[in-house]
Amino acid sequence: MNGYYFSILHGAVLTVGVSLLALLVSIVLGLLGAAAKLSGNKLLVALATAYTTIIRGIPDLVVMLLVFYGGTIGLNHLIELTGSKQHIDINPFFAGVLTIGFIYGAYMTESFRGAILSIPKGQMEAAWAFGMGRVQTFMRITAPQMVRYALPSFTNNWLVLIKATALVSLIGLQEMTYLAKQASSATRSPFAFFLFTAGLFLVYTTVSLYALRKLNERFSLGAKRGTL
Amino acid sequence: MKWYVIFEPQNLALYGEGILTTLGLLFSSLGIGAVLALIFALLLTGPWAPLRWIVGAYTYVMRGTPLLIQVYLIYYGLGQLEWIQARWDAVWPWTHFKEPFFCALLAFSLNTAGYTAEMLAGAIRETSPGEIEAAHAYGMSRFQTMLRVVLPSAMRRTLPAYSNEVVMMLHATSLASAVPNMLDVTSAASRIYATYYLPFEAYLAAAAIYLAASFCLIGFFRFSEGRLLAYLSRRRD
């Protein structure tokens, strides 16, 4: 009986891994998406808008099943075309990380775009006047200030992302939800195992909330707060 | 791509049945959830501290754990408890815990109630003090002030956030496919995938259905926000 709890704890490590890697993917995609939306280039704006609108209109689970099952068949078709007889199975870990990252990249795009727009235009103009290039302006001026504006919606996205990792169990990744389900069908005591897993998720979200609040305080040090 | 498979009558019927289940789950869980959310929001902003704590803990747990686990807890988990086992063969309402639709509906309703209660409670707390003072000046009691002044405006101000929650719930209903014997849009797609081995066509069709439903819901909320929140929008000079 205790062995099952240990294996669920083991799965919790995998959950942390999936969510952190997916977060990384989503931040990269979010920055690219925000850059595309603010670029003023019609094609890029249209592409980024299509990305955020479509992804946010479809359930995470459907995107995940599409990528996992569709991706497997698509890849194998491509391999057949090259004449090789090898069969490839997509690893559920990578499928999960990429899909969750791809989905939450769309949400991150919106929060980063809003954050960049909240920075007074004069800041960037001043940087250009100093002769900084686009990359330098972003690294030195935009990014550090963006963090403060982006953090509230970033926190929301992160909490939803953590919970979305439970869906990866449905495509066969052996993270804690999957292991809890296995343990419950093996021992016929599902209630305890699911409650334990729910508790682990709660710990994870609570720790994240605390850490992000500290981070928010750190990045808001110089900001004046309006008092009524 | 073999799109014609999707348009064969029996497969279209499968999607049709899926749409009915999905919409049925969505609207009934939203309805039950809204009633619960109203009660919870009133308790969250009410004068009884122990009730505030209890409801606060409830919303924290509901919002901090994945919906999938909540569905599993209700569908697989409750059946383990002897107290329920002793009753679910004969005693109403426990007989319903054997039905997958009821279990999914219960999980979704409790979940959306947690999220909506926090939104509504936030809007109630943000009601401008002047409005409440004016109500008191007219001699309205606490109850009357709540019913006539605070709630009508707070519920309207919750609309923008609530429209997000409704679209999220539409997407959440896809988790019903994790419960055996449920036929929502996602499980319809999974069945077609399993029968014909056509993942792209099956899931893309489901995605298109969800996308269309999302747009309809968003359009409806834009329309109602325009009407109900007209007094908050910027005046055109």
Image (spheres, rainbow, N blue to C red):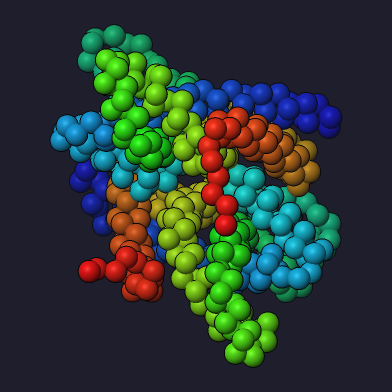
Q: Position of residue A89 (x, y in %)?
A: 43, 20
Q: Is residue A163 above or below residue B114?
A: above
Which residue is located at x 68 percent, y 82 percent?
A: B142
Residue B163 in the figure: left or right of residue A170? left
- Residue placed at 44% from the left, 55% from the top? B164
Q: Is residue A60 above or below residue A142?
A: below
Which quadrant of the figure has residue B200?
top left
Q: Quadrant of the C terminus of chain A?
A: bottom right
The residue at the far bottom in this view is B139
The residue that appears at 53% across and 37% down in the rendered structure is: A223
Residue nearest the observer in this picture, B105 or A21: A21
- Tell me: A24 left or right of A188: left
Q: Is B41 drawn above or below residue B161 in the view shown?
A: below
Count the numbered circles shown: 0
**Where's the N terminus of chain A, which quadrant?**
top right
Q: Position of residue A117 (x, y in %)?
A: 34, 39
Horizontal and vertical percent position of residue B94 = 73, 67
> Quick check: can you spot residue B190?
no
Q: Residue at x 54, y 41 (%)?
A: A224
How far across and down, in percent of the image, does residue B167 sit? 42, 56
**Near-viewer residue (A62 or B199):** A62
Q: Could one spot residue B85 in this view of the protein? A: yes
Which is nearer the eye, A23 or B185?
Answer: A23
Q: Is residue B196 left or right of residue A194?
A: left
Q: Relative to residue B47, is residue A163 depicted above or below?
A: above
